[in-house]
Amino acid sequence: MQFHDGIMCIFHKLQTIIGLFGNSFLLYLYSLKLIINQRIKLIDKICINLVFSNILMMLFRGIPWTMQTCNQKKFMSDIECKIIIYVQRVSWGTSLCTTCLLSVFQAITITSCGPKWAKLKARVLKSIVPACVFIWVLNLLIDLVVPLYVSAPRSSNNSQLIRNLGYCSVDIYALTIIKIGIWKTFFDAVFVGLMSITSGYMVLILYRHHWQVQHIHHTSFNPSASAEIRATKFILCLMSIFVCFSSLSSIFVIVMDNSKDTKQWVVNISTFFSLIYPTISPFVLMSSDSKNASYCNAFNRMKKSYKHSSKNPE
C-alpha cells in the first residue's frame, strides 16, 4: 500500500464511522421524540427520510470504499456489485430529492400568506408523507436499469469504455448508448434548480426579517417565528453543503469521464467528497433543534421512574 492510499484509508474509515454514528444517533433522537411527545413534526418526518438515505449511503458506499482502499483486493461477485451500485445510486438520488423537499417545505412554512393561500398551504403540508414515499419509488424506478451494466472488477483494454471502481466495474459505453447519464443529469438538475430557487426565496425572507428587526423596536417577541428563522438558517446551511461537495465530486467524475486512464486517487477523492454530505448533515440537523438535550434528559427520567416503580410495586 502506497502512502497516499494509507492516508485515504484513514480518511474513509473516519468518515464512515462518524457518518454512521451521527445518523444513527439522530435516528435515536427522533425515536425519543416519538416516545416522549407521541408525535413527530412534519419537518422531522422529512429529516428521518434523509437519515435513512444517509445510512444507506454510508453502508453501501462508505464501507465498500473503505474495504477497497484499505485492503486493495477484489472481494465482490457480480450480484453483490449490482446490488451495491444500485443502492448507492438510489440512496444518493433520494438524498438529493429529500434535501430539495426539505427546502420547499421550509420555504412554504415561513411564507406569510393570506386566507386564500392558507388552505392550499395546509393541503401541501399534508402531502409531505406521500411525497417522501414517492421520492423512494421514483428513485427505485429510475435506476432500475443500472445493475444490468455493473459487474465485478475486470480489466479492459479501453478504460473509457469500462470504468473500474476498484470493487466493481461499470460499462460506461453501454450507459452512454442508452442515454442514462443524460436523463440522470437532467433529473438532478431539476431538483438542484428547485433547491436554488427556494434557497433564494428563503434568503429574501431572512433579509426582510433582519430589516424588520432593525427598524421595528417596539414589537412583541414571537418564539415560534424565532424558531422558524433558526431552522431556515440551518436548512440553508445544509443545502449549501450539499451543492458544494456534490459539485466537487461531479468535477472529479467529469475528469474520469474525459481521461484515457482513470487514476485510483481521483476515484477515491470523488467518493470522499460525495460522502461528506451524509456525514455532516446529521450534525447540522441535531444543531438546528435546541430541544434535543431536553429529550434525552426526559427519556432518562422516564427510565429511572419506570425502574423505580418496577422495584417497588404497590
Image: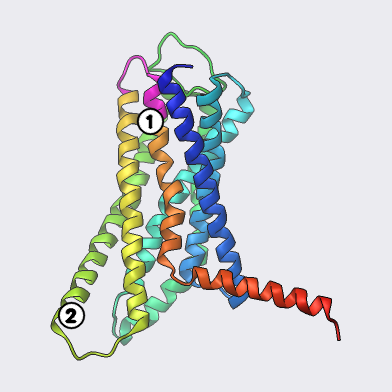
Name the residue at the top extreme: 157
Residue 236 sits above or below residue 156 on the image: below
- The quadrant of the rendering that contains the C terminus is bottom right
Q: In the rendering, at what x and y percent does residue 130 appear?
A: 52, 64
Identified at 43% across, 76% down, the residue is 123
Query: In which quarter of the view is residue 308 placed?
Result: bottom right
Residue 118 sits above or below residue 127 on the image: below
Q: Is residue 28 left or right of residue 116?
A: right
Q: Which segment did they paint magenta?
A: 257-269
Q: Amino acid at mark 2?
A: Gln
Image marks 2 and 1: residues in contact by CB distance under 8 Å:
no
Name the residue at the right extreme: 314
Query: In which quarter of the view is residue 219 placed?
Result: bottom left
List the residue tagged with mark 2.
Answer: 212
Between 68 and 41, the one lying in front of the other is 68
List the residue tagged with mark 1.
Answer: 269
Residue 188 seen in the current view: yes
